[in-house]
Image (cartoon, grey):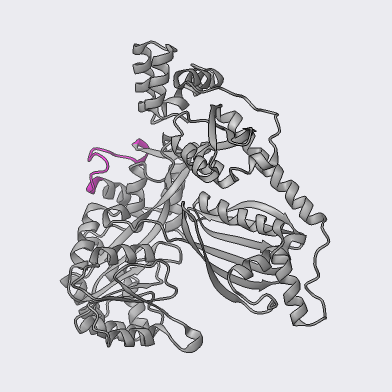
Amino acid sequence: MFTDKQLVKIIDSSGIFSAPDIKKYQGEADAKRQPLENFLLGKRLISEDSLYENAAGVYSVPFIKLRGKPIRKDVLFLVPEPLAKHYQIIAYDTEGDDTIKVVSTDPENLQAVEFLRKKTAKKIELSLTTPDEWQELMKQYHKSLQAEFSELSAKPGKKSTTKAGSKKIDKDLKELAEDLPVIGVVDTILEYAIFEGASDIHIEPTEKDLNVRYRIDGVLKNVMNLPKTIQPGVTARIKVLSTLKLDEHRLPQDGRFKIETEEYRVAFRVSVLPTFDGEKIVLRLLDEGSQILTLAQLGLQPKELDLLQINITKPHGMILVTGPTGSGKTTTLYTVLNVLNKPEVNISTVEDPIEYRMQGINQSQVNPKIGYTFAMGLRALLRQDPNIIMVGEIRDLETAEIAVNAAMTGHLLLSTLHTNDAVTAIPRLFDMGIPPFLVASTTNMVMAQRLVRRICSLCISSYTLDKAALDELKKQFDLGAILNALVRHGSVAKKTKSFGDLLFYRGKGCKQCGDDGYRGRVGVYEILNISKEVNDAILRKASREELVELARKQGMTTLLEDGFLKAKAGITTIEEVLRVTQE
């Protein structure tokens, strides 16, 4: 898809529309919050073929249509599918020994051309095609992979259940793991996941096949179903990469490996679990080349951002981050540590596991198998003269007691708890056995968070809630209170009377977001600041309900309210807010 700037250049240079018409259409597209290309094609003001043919003329590149033309497998895979999708470029032919012919939907795709030139050390000849044609060409990857999988399934599978002894089994599995087609399949699964931006890969055996799913932006998506006969090979290959026991099929195993190229550096945390139909494998992707966020990029509201900045500059006390698994707690803690990471302070962590390496910070990983727990690690850290400590999670009374004592004796301590909201962290500490006076005197703030998917900026559109949707929301929430929160934050005008008057947003779905309507994620937050009033309430061991009421009086923005603020701002959708806050 062309950017609006590219499109105006194409239209202006080729004389498709007059200058006044361009201005008019641009205004109408902006009013509907649509990309100009989507608007023009949707209104049938120009055909896709005509637009891209004119664009080819303006940029002096050939225009080509390859629908129905099969591409040789060796040529097609000069650009693997994940790279083709990421860089929007497909190899379709060669010329002699030194030229590769490629096709794209972007005539200014210089980054992809340069990348491919360096990768292949050959000349790259670029042609332009339409998005529809490009999608048809992409299907050839699936046909080629399917043919490869069929070829694998036709091969007689190696027997991993032989009774010849463990050494023989081990040798057979190693041979299977080194089979070139198996290596190709596993490499494709891993590479595709990296370029799709997946956080996890699930390889799940069923009775008849092997199912591969990716978790992308927090949601699992089915990617491919492989023949059952390939299961031993895929499992063995991943075990070899992770240095796990090949002949162990009855017990869970955990491992790790890393892939490094010029484009990315990704660590894979591997978990193997025996199931009825075979071993299920889950791989967590940790992008070691990613940049750590700034506090502003976390997505906090201005007031909450100020509270966080004030509390992390305090010399001692506890800052707790709560939320379920996968809600971004670790990312938040790393972001805070990055801000605090200065030569004049000693920062140490105890984690399970270490997800990202940070320069200048002493990171230690627990190992329960040898008795190295959070509590033991925390005790050891306190003998290392730290200024700031990060504990991956407070799971038990022993860890909680040491953490509280550390916070009380001049250390700033960051940690996580598994609670659904910020306020519940306080009674959770009580339940663990921490006395109220210690909780009150050491806790600086508690922040709860979730991750919601961002609306794709290329296919965003606005709408108003219909009566049925409003009635459904009224059954679940106090819409008046949420509307007051929107007014209080300046998100809507004071004169707004009803939710039905408000514009909200959703993504229509486009090729850039895989027709999901979402790309990327952002946090929604609530912060319980331990003010004098909250401190007094903790001392008298107030109930959760009392603490919630007191926090609301102090102006605490709840997770739900922050979600609706982001929905109203066009950052996410109401559906996403409900999905993550009502779990």
Viewer-closest of 85 and 426: 85
Q: Is residue 474 above or below residue 533?
A: above
Q: Is residue 260 magenta?
A: no
Give residue 321's position: percent from left, percent from top: 33, 68
Furthest residue toward front: 97
Report the residue at 70% width, 70% height from top: 174
> Does residue 220 appear in the picture of this structure?
no
Q: Is residue 230 above or below residue 458?
A: below
Looking at the image, residue 392 sits to the left or right of residue 547; the answer is right
Residue 141, image x, y percentages: 66, 42
Residue 494 picture quarter? top left
Tell how many labels. 0
Q: x%, y% of residue 318?
A: 26, 75
* Nearest the eye: 284 or 13: 13
Q: Position of residue 101 (x, y in %)?
A: 59, 32
In the rendered view, does 419 fall on the left or right side of 313? Answer: right
**Is residue 191 positioned above or below 177 on the image?**
above
- The quadrant in which residue 433 appears is bottom left
Which of 60/365 is in front?
60
Please name the predominant secondary structure of the magenta segment in the image. loop
> Left or right: 357 with respect to 207?
left
**Which residue is depicted at the point 40% across and 15% down?**
13
Q: Is 499 colored magenta in this rendering?
A: yes
Question: Range of the magenta residues?
Answer: 487-501
User: Which image quarter: residue 2?
Assistant: top left
Asked if one can make out residue 524 in the rendered structure from this viewpoint, the answer is yes
* 237 versus 97 height, above or below: below
Which residue lies at the image location 66% right of the left edge and 28% below the top edge? 67
Taking the image as shown, residue 408 lies to the left or right of residue 285, namely left
